[in-house]
């Protein structure tokens, strides 16, 4: 069985830039490219297989027709989505629903996500959480536009990690680039957008009532407690593990062996180059590559000088 190397889908955004080209070498469609959907079976951006028996096949069809690749995991949709996001300008302040609300109101999963900060300009910030103590106070601060009192800002740097459960008010600030692991959902409720207009001069839609509905009040702290294991030639860190996903940070400097933990493993190379050996075959891997190790690959070895973010449901 071969790993499934994937061709991502690039998405233009009002706040996007050029770092997906400048830092990762992707062929971006414009100077306002905000996202690479690197591993995705979501209908708004389905990635396709680049190699082997399933070359040219979209990931959603593989999930539908070859569930054995995914350990016969149950579920109507491929559960995870991996993105790289380039916030040249501030993203809108937003919040995502949980599964119950998302399925009832939007017909798709809710969205719990997490961010590994790939790079951040000096002084870059994110919005993470809020100060309202009740729904009534939340509504009042929103309706009076008292964003400074409502929103919590956090300065960030490369290597920081944030867990962002559904119900968390959040936004990436300008100059921040992240690798995001999330539930496979594209439901976003926009709470505030700095009164920006699009190319036609129109204000972007806001979703105030839905945002108030789904925001966790009072805000919860979501501390992350990474655990690191030193191995020969490597440093393997579990960043987060919960009902939605487990996410790992692998720093590799020489050959390191791995075992399939559950159904399958999603792999994103965020720096360096080296090789992947699986089922007796060797594949070159380098910064910007994204692939899935299907269920049939039970063991593999990665060699070289590489920095990887990996995950599984």
Image (cartoon, rainbow, N blue to C red):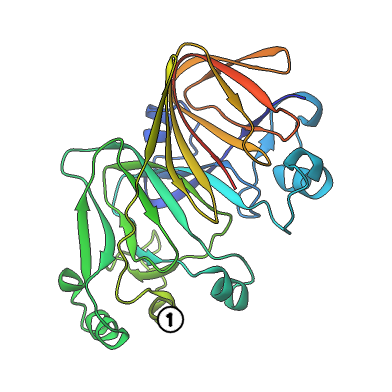
**Residue 17 appears in the picture as rendered:** no
Q: Quadrant of residue 116?
A: top left
Q: Residue furthest bottom?
A: 136
Residue at x 51% of width, y 61% of height:
111
Q: Nearer the viewer, residue 21 or 49?
A: 49
The answer to whether 160 appears left or right of 39 in the picture is left
Residue 243 rendering spot, x and y as whole percentages: 55, 56
Residue at x 55% of width, y 55% of height:
244
Count of residue discs: 1
Q: Quadrant of residue 5?
A: top right
Q: Secondary structure beneath disc 1?
A: helix
> What is the crowding at mark 1: few (fewer than 14 residues within 10 Å), some, or many (at least 20)?
few
Q: Quadrant of residue 232?
A: top left
**Residue 190 appears in the picture as rendered:** yes
The answer to whether 125 appears left or right of 15 in the picture is left
Q: Is residue 136 above or below residue 284?
A: below
Residue at x 27% of width, y 58% of height:
127
Residue 24 rendering spot, x and y as whole percentages: 43, 27
Q: Is residue 76 above or below residue 41?
A: below
Residue 30 rendering spot, x and y as whole percentages: 45, 40
The answer to whether 80 appears left or right of 51 in the picture is left
Q: Nearer the viewer, residue 30 or 13?
A: 13
User: Which residue lies under the disc numbered 1?
Assistant: 213
Q: Nearer the viewer, residue 140 or 230?
A: 230
Q: Is residue 48 above or below residue 130?
A: above
Q: Is residue 245 above or below residue 131?
A: above
Residue 304 rendering spot, x and y as whole percentages: 48, 12
Residue at x 42% of width, y 50% of height:
114
Figure quadrant of the N terminus: top right
């Amino acid at each position: 069985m071969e790993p499934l190397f994937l061709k991502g889908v690039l998405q233009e955004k009002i706040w996007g830039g050029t770092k997906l080209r400048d830092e990762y070498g992707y062929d971006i469609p414009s100077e306002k490219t905000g996202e690479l959907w690197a591993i995705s079976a979501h209908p708004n951006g389905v990635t396709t297989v680049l190699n082997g028996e399933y070359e040219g096949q979209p990931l959603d069809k593989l999930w539908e027709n070859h569930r054995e690749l995914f350990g016969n995991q149950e579920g109507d949709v491929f559960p995870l989505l991996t993105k790289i996001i380039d916030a040249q300008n501030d993203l809108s302040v937003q919040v995502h629903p949980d599964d119950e609300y998302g399925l009832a109101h939007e017909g798709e999963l809710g969205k719990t996500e997490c961010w590994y900060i790939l790079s951040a300009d000096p002084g870059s910030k994110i919005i993470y959480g809020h100060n309202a103590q009740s729904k009534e106070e939340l509504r009042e601060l929103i309706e009076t536009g008292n964003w400074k009192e409502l929103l919590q800002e956090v300065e960030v740097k490369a290597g920081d990690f944030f867990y962002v459960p559904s119900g968390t008010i959040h936004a990436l600030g300008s100059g921040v680039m992240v690798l995001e692991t999330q539930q496979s959902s594209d439901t976003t409720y926009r709470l505030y957008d700095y009164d920006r207009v699009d190319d036609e001069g129109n204000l972007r839609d806001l979703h105030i009532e839905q945002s108030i509905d789904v925001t966790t009040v009072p805000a919860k702290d979501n501390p992350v407690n990474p655990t690191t294991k030193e191995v020969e030639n490597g440093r393997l860190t579990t960043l987060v593990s919960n009902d939605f996903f487990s996410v790992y940070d692998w720093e590799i400097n020489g050959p390191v062996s791995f075992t399939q933990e559950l159904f399958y493993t999603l792999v994103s190379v965020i720096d360096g180059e080296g090789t992947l050996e699986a089922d007796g075959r060797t594949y070159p891997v380098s910064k910007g590559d994204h692939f899935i190790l299907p269920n049939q690959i039970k063991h593999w070895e990665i060699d070289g000088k590489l920095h990887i973010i990996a995950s599984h449901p």
